Image (cartoon, grey):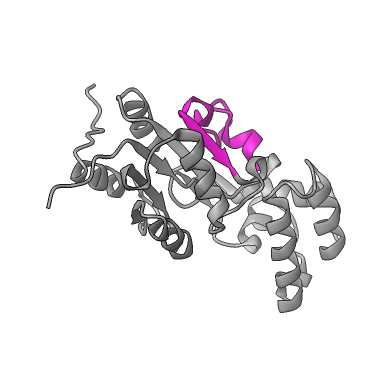
Amino acid sequence: MPEPDIQLVVFDLGGVLIRLAPSWRDAFTHAGLPYPKQLDAPETTVALEKLVEIEEVGGFGKLGFFDKAGELLGIESGDLIRAADAYLRGPFPGIPELLDVLMASPIPTACLSNTNHNHWKDLANPDHPNGLPLLDLDHPVASQLVGHRKPNPGIYQHLEESTGIQAQNILFFDDRQDNIDAANDRGWNTHRVTHPTDTAPEIRAVLARHNIQVESQT
């Protein structure tokens, strides 16, 4: 059976294009801050995750999340901002070069990310250590800007409607199975990225199977 005609390549960010800290403990340590012991309590972890979910659909504005989460953890909001910044670790090796070649090709590109105002500001700045030229993608979609987060069907529907591209012509990369499952339910072509430290070769191999070549010509 021939591969489907891919007319849009879509990337998740964290765990696919961007490296992330493995845990909040690691992020606080990387930022040179003491780890809040409250995070060891399961009920605090659940409460923080609920705050994150609200933040990722734009529910708190630009800095409201840090005030509420800082109060929950018993720390200053500024320290939490520093830890959140340390959660991002920059692009995986080879990803900027892969994107440069792909964005110069005729195939449109997109990202579909659960993120927040603070991270998006850095991620979309190619001059920032954590940044990529995300705004140069044809369709950059961030959850806090559209009011839906994966795996909610609304964010997938938003991309389909804003691009006009049919589900069977979309290729989507993500590192979470629930997000992949939601895309599969809509009829997208998907690949779950599983390599923890070097995602570019895995992405290149999948693109090649769909007759999309992203090897640098230099």
Q: Quadrant of residue 24?
A: bottom right
Q: Where residue 99 sits in the image (x, y, percent)?
A: 38, 32
In the displayed structure, 63 sits above or below 125; it is below
The stretch in magenta equals: 119-142
Q: Say whether residue 140 is magenta.
A: yes
Q: Say whether residue 159 is magenta.
A: no
Q: Quadrant of residue 25?
A: bottom right
Q: Nearer the viewer, residue 49 or 78?
A: 49
Residue appearing at x 68%, y 58% in the figure: 53
Q: Quadrant of residue 142?
A: top right
Would you say 198 lies left or right of 137 here?
left
Would you say 218 lies left or right of 189 here?
left
Residue appearing at x 39%, y 49% in the figure: 173
The answer to whether residue 50 of the structure is visible from this angle is yes
Q: Where residue 4 sits in the image (x, y, percent)?
A: 22, 45
The answer to whether residue 35 of the structure is visible from this angle is no
Would you say 43 lies left or right of 218 here?
right
Q: Where residue 215 sits in the image (x, y, percent)?
A: 23, 32
In the displayed structure, 107 sits above or below 75; it is above
Q: Nearer the viewer, residue 11 or 30?
A: 11
